[in-house]
Structure formats: structure tokens, C-alpha cells
Amino acid sequence: MAITLSRLLGSTALSLRSLNDISAAADIPIEWAAVTELRDPSPFLSGGEIVLTTGLRQTTIANQQAFVETVHGAGALALGYGTGLSHRSVPAAVLRKAGELGLPVFEVPYETPFVAITKMIADALNADHLARLERLLKGHQQLASTLLTGGLRAMLRELSRMLGSAVSLTQFGARVHGPELGEERWQAVPIATGLKDRCTLYLAEPYVRDGLVDYAQGLIGLELANQARLRESNRLVAGQAFADLIAGSLTGSEATARLQGIGVSPQQAHSVVLVQASVGHEKALRTLPIPPQLEHAVSAIVEDRLALIITGAGASTFADQIDAYLDGAGIGARVGFGGDYAQANGLRWSFFEGLEALRHGERINTPSRLSLTSLLLAARDVPLQALAQEALGPLEAFDKKHSAELMGTLRHYLELDGSVGAVAETLGLHRNTVRYRLQQISELSGYDPTTTADRVQLWLALTAKDVT
């Protein structure tokens, strides 16, 4: 470590002699040594150094006292006074003023050159710098090794041990590692991952601020970026298996093998939670980390939605938690979930229930068990798109050309159980206007919304349009 004033004065090779009380500064490391014969050396002092002088220009008591005041005011640690050249001994005025100010003074005999003092200080500083570099290099190697062998959390624990300070890491507003941020003073260190994830490393103060934190900052950013790329790749692979299952092209033992390959055991009951991101946030779902308390879910990207497969019941609670996480992360999204079923077909059924639930348009959408819509969605060979286009295509074209609002009228008519009066009140129309529009819908689509059979066809067409 850097040499202290007591160690400097204790060096027999230098023969320095303390002339007053040095106890207040004895164990403070010396920052440097400034040799000067200026009457006012303060522009060249930064504080923490010792000042060496022979007092060549200090020919009066006033000059001597002013010099001591200047040196003390600049934050010098001590004053070394060379004797045998300008002064046979350290002037009494210097000692008196230094005593008043509490500035340590020591005598440098004529036989001891100032350069010997500065060299001893420089050697100590160089040795201290080298030791810090060696410790830093060793720390870098230790952190990198821990990351490679134990992962990110093991590396963060090692960083905490090396700093002697608590360490916490957050990403997307969620705590990834470490304690909650309590009332302690925390230093926030931003982590660059290449994602808009507000990743931050928090260090409880006090801690030693050195290059170890800078190195850890880079390691964490690199590791999180690698994790994001791996997460995206895994989700796309899992999504392909899931898409094959949904399409009905994956059955029997092949379905079991593919599902087990992505971490899903078909023998157990599973629920599917679907996240539908709002416009502009879809890409974030590919790399979005799942909070530690929700990491038990298997994640996949299916048709730009994030599918989270959880074992057993509990989808409702999971949906609440993932919604709160998405809200804190600043990602606009809707969450829907299906029931818990066993076997590959049950997983498929849960997916379609969750998909239908997203139609409700709420932040969290609860499914209707065993719904007709889910049944039709699960049977991919049912031509729902063709049905929707056949029935609704002419209405959409007419609306586009004439701004007739037939689609809106039909939707309200079906949602309001076929009540002309309710539709008229909701849309602010005359009842006859509603009846006229219903007649137009019948003529254009070929389905009469006032009859039960045709009303079902139109409802299915609207449902198919909304979902697919």
C-alpha cells in the first residue's frame, strides 16, 4: 500500500525528524511529494501530499507564517523543511504557525536529498498500483470463471463477496437476483444488454469503487444478451413443436417425444397462458425474461404470441402475476389462459381456450370451458376462414364503399340477443333504421340475422374473423 507519514518518518535511511504532533495524520497514505520554493505553491497542490521546501524565499516571519497557512489551506498532509542550506534549523515562526493549524512538520537534514524522499513515495505508490492491478486481474479471472462454471447468479454472489457489499440486479423492472431494495443507500449501475430492458445493477453502499465493478458490468451485459438470444432460439423451437400440435399434425408417440423435448410431460395436466402484445411490443416477447418466481413455465412463441405452459391448475394466479410483470416492464399486452388438461390433445384444447379468451379484450381474460368456439378452433379442418369471408366479405365491401356501418350493427345485434330496440338505443338510431340495416345484411350475406339458424352462422363467422 501507499506509504504513510509515520512509515516515512520511521525510515532510518532518510533520517527525518518529526518536530510536532503528527498523530492526526500518521496513518494517512501520502498521495505525492511536492518540492517547491515558491511563496505561494497552492496552484500546484491538490491535497494529500507532503510539501518539501528549504525556505529559500522565506526570509521574514510574515513570509514564513504565510507559507504555512498556504500549504495547510491547500490540504497538504505535512510540511518537510530542509535545513543546512537557507536555514540552520526550522524557523520558530514556521513551527508556531503549524502548531496552531495542526499541520505536521518534520526536518529534512542537509544530508538527505529531497529526491530520496520522493523516490520512496513513488516506489510505494507504484507498488501499491501494481498490487491493485494484480488484485483486479485476479478478480476479473475469478468473476469470469464463476460465470462460466456457475452461471450469472453465482457470479453475482461472488461479486458481492469480493466487494463486501450486497448486490441486486433488476431487469424489466423485476428483481433478477439479490435482496429487495430497502432503505439502504444503493449505487445504481446501468447494464447494457442491447435490449430496452432497463437492466440495472444495484450495489449497497459503502463499497470500494474500482475496476472490478466496471468489469462485472460488462460481463453481466454480455451474459444477459447471450441469454436473450438463447431464450429466443428455444422459444422458436418450442413454438414449432407447439404449432405442429395445434395444427393436428403431431399425434401419438411423436407428440409425446416432441413435447418432452421442450420440457412438457403430456401425462401431467397442463394449462396454457397466452400473451398477446400490443402493436410495437411483439418483438419483445421473443426475448422477454420470465421472473424467477415464474420460471417453472415452459415458454414458446406461437403465431407472434408468447405461450407459457404451466403444470396443473393455477393458470389464473399465473396470469395475474405475468400481467403485473408486463405492466411493470412497460410492455402493453393482453393475457388469456385455458383450463388444465392432460395429454397432448388436452394441451391443444387449453391453447384454443386461451386463444378464444383473448377475444374478450381485457388485460386478463378468463376462458369459457368447453365453448363451441374452442371446439371449432381445435378442429382445424373446419373452414372457418371461408365461412367468415363468404358471410361477411360482402358486408365489409359495402361498408367500405358506402360507410353503412352494417358490420357494427350486426355485431351489436348479436351481442344484444337480437333486440332491435336495444341496438337502436345503443347506436342512437331509429328502430326502422336498424330493421333496414338488418334487411341489407340479409340480402348481401345470404343469411337472415332474424332467424336462429342464420344468426348462429353469422355469429360463428364473426367469431372466426375475430380469432383467426
Image: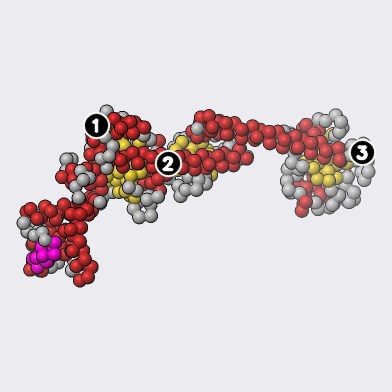
Q: Which residues are magenta?
A: 435-445
Which quadrant of the view contains residue 120? Answer: top right
As shown in the figure, which amino acid type bears the numbered disc 2?
A: Ser
Direction from residue 191 to residue 297 in the image, left or right: left
Which structural element holds mark 3? loop
Q: Position of residue 68 (x, y in %)?
A: 80, 47
| Residue at figure coordinates x 81%, y 30% from the top left | 10
Task: Tell me the CA gap for discs 3 and 2.
Answer: 76 Å
Q: Do callouts 1 and 2 mark residues in contact (Cβ within 8 Å)?
A: no
- Residue sticking out furthest to the bottom: 402
Towards the viewer: 418 or 395: 395
Is 436 colored magenta in this rendering? yes
Q: Position of residue 80 (x, y in %)?
A: 83, 41
Mark number displayed over residue 110: 3
Q: Earlier in the sequence, mark 1 or mark 2?
A: 2
Which structural element holds mark 1? loop
Direction from residue 195 to residue 416 in the image, left or right: left
| Residue at figure coordinates x 28%, y 37% from the top left | 250
Mark number displayed over residue 233: 2
As shown in the figure, which amino acid type bears the numbered disc 1?
A: Ala
Task: Tell me the CA gap for discs 3 and 1.
Answer: 94 Å
